Amino acid sequence: MTKLLSRVALAALALGFAGEAMAVEWNVSLWGKRRAFTEHVEKLAELVAEKTGGEFTLNISYGGLSKNTENLDGISIGAFEMAQFCAGYHADKNPTITVLELPFLGVDSLEEEIKVSKAVYQHPATVADLARWNATLLMPSPLPQYNIAGVGEPPRKLADFDGMPVRATGGIGEALSLIGAVPTSVTATETRQALDSGIVKGISFAPHAHMSFGITDVATWWTENLNPGTVNCPVVVNTDALNALSEEHRQALLSSVDAALAHYVDYYENETMAKWWPLLEERGIERIRYDEERLAEFREKAAGPVARKWIEENTARGLPAQELYDLVIATLGR
């Protein structure tokens, strides 16, 4: 009887260890605070936990694991299993996806941004590009067109941007430089300090970020319809960690992406933008609107030249740059 009880105890203990071994926790590196920009990751975590009965969880950290500009590096060495970053933070590390940051691509909705991002993410050149960092692209963080909020003399004409230091990255920065602005690379978490200290006079952001990083607390104007482009900020996973998941956990993760993105779009349109317009009125932020003739000149001056430069530079890197650009245009039906 004693031997039998011992065997039962050992079996129970073994089952306990096996159950514990089945539990998987991934660390996720984001930055700032929970906001529209991170809602798809939050929803993904919720769905994965539900589908696996809590056996697979995503432990989301806002700045506690890495700087936002170093998230791809952290993924590459396995410091954490999932992260979000923006292509413009280090274009040399992820040149393929910077095609999505070219100015005036004509993306009209968050749904279109998702569609075109997914097309580029699935291209073999993009997959190989991110594989250099042991990273697999999981999903985009679709953002609307950026516009500039700032302090000081409002740029009521495009010519008023001449000499103005503006926080802008990637293709947006290049486009703004063509109307005389001085693009300055400042990470999202440093923008308010840069504005307060006078390093920049304007911040190029989507609406949620203007609110989340305190820009609307001090801004006196906002360019309502400049719409020079947007940034591309994917969520990636460490490839080794993804491959190590059980089939059940992998499917729980991958099958939750579309629902997480649908939640993100709904949240952005019905929560974020519902707050944005009243906030502008409440803070007395002047909405600067440019006439269509000037905007058409800006698009003509920036869109073609910046795209051609991007294609030339990345073709020289050995990338199928023209093919990637054509993929974007074809996917958008332009």
Image: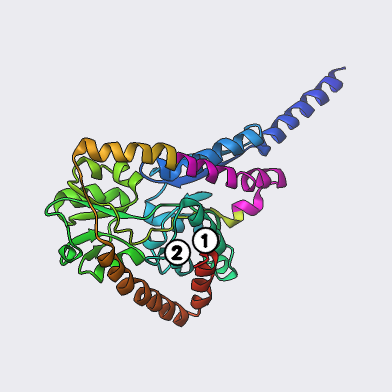
Residues 158 and 72: in front is: 158
Residue 129 to residue 107: above or below: below
Residue 311 horizontal/vertical position (percent):
44, 77
Instruction: Examine the image and state in which quarter residue 274 appears.
Output: top left
Residue 197 relative to residue 105: left or right: left
**Looking at the image, which is closer to me, 124 or 267?**
267
* Magenta segment boundaries in residue numbering: 241-267
Q: Quadrant of the rendered structure where residue 201 is?
A: bottom left
Residue 131: in sight, yes or no?
A: no
Query: Looking at numbered disc 1 in the image, what kind of residue is underneath it?
Result: Val
Q: CA distance from mark 1 to mark 2?
A: 8 Å
The residue carrying pointer 1 sits among few (fewer than 14), some (14 to 19) or many (20 or more) residues within 10 Å by Cα, namely: many
In the image, taking residue 124 as reference, residue 196 lies left or right, namely left
**In percent of the image, x 47 and y 80: which residue is there?**
315
Taking 128 as reference, is 309 above or below it?
below
The prevailing secondary structure element of the residues shown in magenta is helix
Q: Nearer the viewer, residue 279 or 233?
A: 279
Q: Earlier in the sequence, mark 1 or mark 2?
A: 2
Does the residue at mark 1 contact the one at mark 2 (Cβ under 8 Å)?
Answer: yes
Q: Is residue 168 magenta?
A: no
Q: Which residue corresponds to the image point at 44% horizontal and 43% vertical from the top-left?
A: 38
Element type at marker 1?
helix
Residue 27, x across and y down, in percent: 51, 43
Label 1 belongs to which residue? 116
Which circle marks residue 100 in the picture? 2
Task: Kindly identify the residue that appears in the image at 33 percent across and 46 percent down.
Answer: 207
Which image quarter holds the N terminus?
top right
Name of the residue lying farthest toward the left: 153
Q: Secondary structure at mark 2?
A: helix
Few, some or many residues within 10 Å of mark 2 (<14, 14–19, 20+):
many
